[in-house]
Image: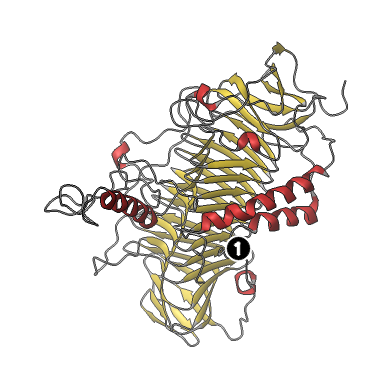
Amino acid sequence: MKGCRGYATRSAGARMRASAGAGALAVALALSLAGCAAPDASAAGEVAAADPGDGRAASQEAEAHAGLDGLDLEFSKRDTDASYDVDVACTITLADAGVQVQGNGAQADGTAVTISAGGTYVISGTVQQGSIVVDAGDEDAVQLVLDGASIHNEVGPALFVANADACVLTLVEGSENALSDGAAYQLEDKDDKRDAVIFSKNDLIINGSGSLAVTASCKHAVCSNDDLVITGGTFAVTAVQDAFRGKDCIKIAGGSFVVEAGDDAFHSDAFFYAKDGTITVESCYEGYEGEQVIIDGGDHTITAQDDALNAALSDDDADADVADADEAARVADGGDAGMDALGSFAGVPEGGSPAPPASAPEEGGGWTPGALGEDAGQAPGAPPDAQGAPGGSGSGFDGDQMAASSSDCLIQINGGTLRLTAGSDGVDSNGLVQINGGTVLVSGPDAGMDGALDYDISAEVTGGTILLMGSVGNTQGLDASTQPVVYASVAGTAGQEVQLLDEQGAVLASFVAGADFSTVFASSPQIADGQACSVQVGDTSTDLVMGDMLDAAQTAGMGRGRAPQVASQGEQGPGRSAGEA
């Protein structure tokens, strides 16, 4: 699929802002019709917000998408259709003694299989050292049906799509499939970029309801140089670096995922989009990364050493923005275009080539996915050697330089449930943040430049239930959100349950803190501006007024907002459920 990156243009931010105001108003009007009653939800991570219903949720989603010109957020019939005709399919039976092929379009050479024509191929069996290569025509659609297939390739990808119009990987219902690689590839061409267990140069679509385990010991697990679209399946993925990569986009419409990644769990140079699905990222450096991160639904639990959600320019776009700015400055100062004040081309040492990013992962490397810190109150931490840390690919960082800010960078949450525990920023955009619906629960750090929420340009809340523990580095736009928010001094320690309660004491949201914190940010469509509410940490309750905002400068950040009017604390029991006195 081409054109997925249409939003990432220099005029895209202006287009989005032009339509965002109308969309925000429509969403706010829809939310104002929601009921105010809230059942009890005292379990950690559960929320008792009123369900807007499918129709209203669809309307909110459509309004939010109105500003995303150029992004293809649709799923085609080919994406979702997991059917196949076994009577006309070519069957491939894997075995260490030799692969058996019955039908046309595929040839076996020992345990290596090459598919050279479009069609359907049903694959089963086990091979300890083998591979499948798809090298078909430009217009050929290839469907690979995995029905109990296990492939290990010690020296390269287990599945390599060299050429096709698109490759559909279908997981047969009830089947268990496994693909893996070795720690070092042996590729004849040094420019060969194959670096994943499943590597496709073209669109890669995964559907069906079977299971797929992918173990990447070299670098990445699943990678597409075009679109990566997933509409079903059960996935258990472990990767030294990225678990899922889609250069032009990653789109998820369903499936169940358990991921451990040394770098990004999901990375796209363009956009990441989740419509549905259950995703649990047990460990990673960053969770979801793209220039745009759009979440319409699903259940998302992420434990990240750095950012849980990160919207940043891709390396190419970030470099272009920096180069444009530098060149404009040089010309304005009377210098020659393309050269710095010393007469050297920008970014290139005299007589040499640009140095690689200091933050880029070592080739074929990464680090062991980590867990939370051993000490109480310690958030997930970065690896000991920051110079060799992952996060360089597509992160917009080059060594110690700050990432480029851009209105093209967007995190938009329209629905779903997110539980984010981060060692750096929970939600981090180098541009904009929009929360229009869903449930957003975040535990982030409380010191330095890191926190639960961080953005460079502006953020707004038009809907959704939000409970963030940790600092907010910027409040620009938040205090003008169409749905009121509260940001206040409320302290707690790692492991404590934190609850947001309405004026009657009904629990609207709760989450267990992953690190010590001294501030809380919250919002709910069930609490009006100026209405009393409270945040309970353990047995201690802090009374608040919705709409009160700490100035972020008071928490080592920057921003604006009025000082809290109510901040009384008192000891009382756990939050009451709706209806209690």
Q: Which quarter shows the C terminus?
A: top right
Q: How many numbered marks does the figure carry?
A: 1
Of residues 150 and 337, the one drawn nearer to the viewer in this rendering: 337
Circle 1 sits in a helix, a strand or a loop, which is it? loop
Q: Position of residue 281 (x, y in %)?
A: 53, 45
Residue 271: % across, % down: 51, 57
Name the residue: 69% across, 52% down: 22
Q: Is residue 363 visible?
A: no
Residue pictured at 67% horizontal, 46% vertical: 436
Lateral position of residue 370 relative to residue 464, left or right: left
Q: Is residue 378 left or right of residue 436?
A: left
Question: Farthest residue in the top direction?
Answer: 570
Query: Relative to the observer, which residue lies in front, 223 or 529?
Result: 529
Quadrant of residue 130 within the rendered picture = bottom left
Q: Looking at numbered disc 1 in the image, what kind of residue is underneath it?
A: Leu
Give coordinates of residue 340: x percent, y percent.
21, 50
Place of residue 193 in the rendered image (x, y in percent of width and height, measured from the top left): 32, 64
- Residue occupying the far left of the picture: 351
Vertical placement of residue 538 versus 204, above or below: above
Question: In the image shown, does 530 or 469 lie closer to the viewer?
Answer: 530
Quadrant of the rendered image containing residue 55:
bottom right
51 horizontally vs 230: left or right: right
| Mark 1, other Cα within 10 Å: few <14 / some 14–19 / many ≥20 | many
Residue pointed to by mark 1? 73
Residue 147 seen: yes
Q: Nearer the viewer, residue 172 or 165?
A: 165
Give the colour scheme of this rendering. secondary structure
